[in-house]
Image: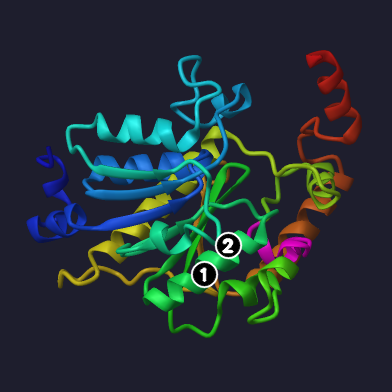
Amino acid sequence: MYARNYGFYSEAEQEALANSTIAIAGAGGDGFQLGYKLAMAGVGNFRVADPEVFEPENGNRVIAANENYINRNKAEVFKEWAESLPTHPNVTIYTEGVNEDNLEDFMYGADLVLDESELTYPHIGTMIARQAVKQAIPDLFVMNIAHAGVATSFHPDGRYTFEKMMGIPEGAPLDEVAEMSVDFTRALPYIPKYGDLRTLQAVQEGASLPSVGTGVDMAAGVGSSEAILHLTSNVKNHRMNPTWAKTFRYMDAYTGKAGKIRHPRASYYIGATTMAARSFLGINPLASYTQEDRSRRESQRK
């Protein structure tokens, strides 16, 4: 099963993956693709939580979102797909999603947690981050933005926490956190210069953050590489260290650029300003994501 992995991983590293447990909160785009890559790589145990079902609109970026699985719970589909692999990982699922009642059970025994809860539910990410500190495990945060993927991890002893990144007061009650709005200058460390400014404006006004298959694949690639660094960190093999917050790794398939972002908020402003200038000059392509565009498509769907 691992014959082709051994060209890049040692037997000790492969054994470490097989003995690892990863908790994944959210099995939609990034969560499904990233988790499935880790299952193919040989991670032996998964705990996967997601209360949502696959819809036709997921088919542009999730390999499993085909007609056979529409209206099926995402965590259930992940379990079915992952357990059918020759590696036969063990997958425990939570179809109610992550909540205060099941959080400890969901993360019990995990070596790494992957936070793929939506940014519009900051209380879920906060719960996960606080539990990761209690368990002294890394909290891996991965996003796709346009044709790019970005990733970082919150160290259980690190000063730059998930709450600090999101601008959430340390120790704030979860019911108050749930009512907070997302500050995208904090939550989006990478803004592609080639984007349509109107899309960024729509997202800031409350529209869903759009995503394309290329970006999800890049996020899955960057994120799974970071996850494997975490899960094999106890094997001495001259590997690089994982990327710890507040530094982000990014890789953009559209521009071919990749690297590290060490000042996320400054990076946001630089990217947004460049996008705005290019959009004003008519250099950037348009993306049909204005309120008028979305309303027209919605009416056509009905």
Taking the image as shown, residue 271 lies to the left or right of residue 66, namely right
> Is residue 249 placed above or below 74 in the rendered structure?
below
Q: Give the range drawn in magenta.
A: 178-190
In the rendered image, which quarter contains the N terminus? Answer: top left
Q: Residue 12 in the image: state x and y as whole percent.
A: 10, 61
In the rendered image, which quarter contains the C terminus? Answer: top right
> Is residue 294 placed above or below 16 in the rendered structure?
above
Q: Mark 1 points at which residue?
A: 129
> Is residue 174 placed above or below 298 in the rendered structure?
below
Q: Residue 7 in the image: state x and y as whole percent.
A: 13, 48
Q: Mark 2 points at which residue?
A: 125
Taking the image as shown, residue 263 lies to the left or right of residue 14, namely right
The crowd level at tag 2 (other Cα within 10 Å; few <14, some 14-19, many 20+) is: many
**Residue pictured at 11% horizontal, 48% vertical:** 6
Which one is in front, 266 or 28?
Answer: 28
> Hey, what amino acid is under mark 2?
Gly
Which one is in front, 270 or 1?
Answer: 1
Kindly report the secondary structure that dominates the magenta region of the rendered protein.
loop
